[in-house]
Image (cartoon, rainbow, N blue to C red):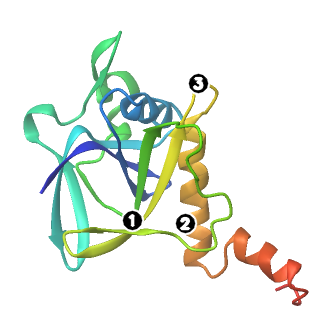
């Protein structure tokens, strides 16, 4: 399966960036690279199933390259070193970037994560509205940290919910 998007390893977590052309996926990837994370694929991500996990990589001809409108094609290892790229990654989190739309009910609490099916595997999927003032790389990093916290037990939303219901803190 191929998808139009980007795949990065953020804090070791495979993050699939999806969204329409021109929304800022590659620019978000570039900002994440400057913060020390790794590029797996830009523009086209090949996905396959391995041991029950969704895996992803770039097609060989475009592997390790990033296209930025107004700048052109960048060879990531040449600019950021060989450690800035990974050949493949499992996918643990999907972040959909979309142009912000007035009146759209974006998630604001996050008690439950919506899931999206890829190759028969459900993956948590977040939708981020892109606005001029938004820093998408910061949102992706926060999403990964939250994903890690949820994997360890309880999210910030669950902690606040328990506090508001008067339950004893953990």
User: Depth check: 123 or 130 in front?
Assistant: 130
- As measured in the structure, the alpha-carbon distance from the residue carrying label 3 to the one carrying label 2 is 25 Å
Q: CA distance from mark 1 to mark 3?
A: 27 Å
Please name the residue shown 66% across and 57% down the image: 108
Q: Is residue 1 above or below residue 30?
A: below
Q: Mark 1 or mark 2, which is nearer the start of the sequence?
A: 1
- Residue at image point 38% right, 38% down: 84
Q: Is residue 155 left or right of residue 119?
A: right
Residue 92: where, in percent of width, then height? Answer: 39, 65
Instruction: Determine contact: label 3, label 2, CB under 8 Å.
Output: no
Which residue occupies 22% across, 56% down? Answer: 56
Task: Name the residue that disc number 1 marks.
Answer: 92
| Vertical arrangement, residue 28 with respect to residue 41, above or below | above
Q: Position of residue 168 (x, y in %)?
A: 89, 90
Q: Secondary structure at mark 2?
A: helix
Q: Nearer the viewer, mark 3 or mark 2?
A: 3
- Please state which of the two labelled residues, at mark 1 or mark 3, is closer to the viewer: 3
Q: Which quadrant would residue 61 be assigned to in this image?
A: top left
Q: Earlier in the sequence, mark 1 or mark 3?
A: 1
Which residue is under mark 3?
A: 132
Crowd rating for badge 1 (residues with CA inside 10 Å; few <14, some 14–19, many 20+) = many
**Where 123 falls versus 4 (above or below)?**
below
**Side of 162 relative to 99 (left or right):** right
Which residue shows up at 41% across the image and 35% down it? 29
Q: Residue furthest left?
A: 61
* Quadrant placement of the C terminus: bottom right
Mark 3: few/some/many CA within 10 Å (<14, 14-19, 20+): few
Q: Which residue is mark 2?
A: 147
């Amino acid at each position: 399966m191929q998808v139009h998007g980007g795949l990065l390893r953020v804090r070791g977590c495979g993050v699939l960036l999806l969204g329409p052309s021109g929304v800022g996926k590659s620019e978000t990837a570039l900002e994440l690279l400057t913060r020390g994370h790794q590029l797996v694929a830009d523009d086209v991500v090949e996905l396959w199933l391995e041991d029950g996990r969704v895996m992803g990589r770039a097609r060989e001809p475009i592997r390790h390259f990033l296209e930025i409108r107004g700048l052109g094609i960048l060879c990531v290892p040449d600019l950021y070193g060989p450690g800035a790229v990974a050949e493949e990654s499992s996918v643990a989190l999907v972040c959909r970037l979309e142009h912000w739309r007035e009146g759209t009910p974006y998630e604001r609490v996050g008690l439950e994560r919506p899931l999206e099916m890829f190759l028969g595997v459900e993956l948590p999927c977040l939708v981020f509205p892109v606005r001029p003032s938004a820093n998408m790389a910061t949102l992706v990093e926060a999403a990964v940290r939250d994903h890690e916290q949820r994997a360890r037990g309880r999210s910030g939303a669950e902690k606040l919910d328990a506090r508001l219901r008067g339950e004893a803190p953990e």
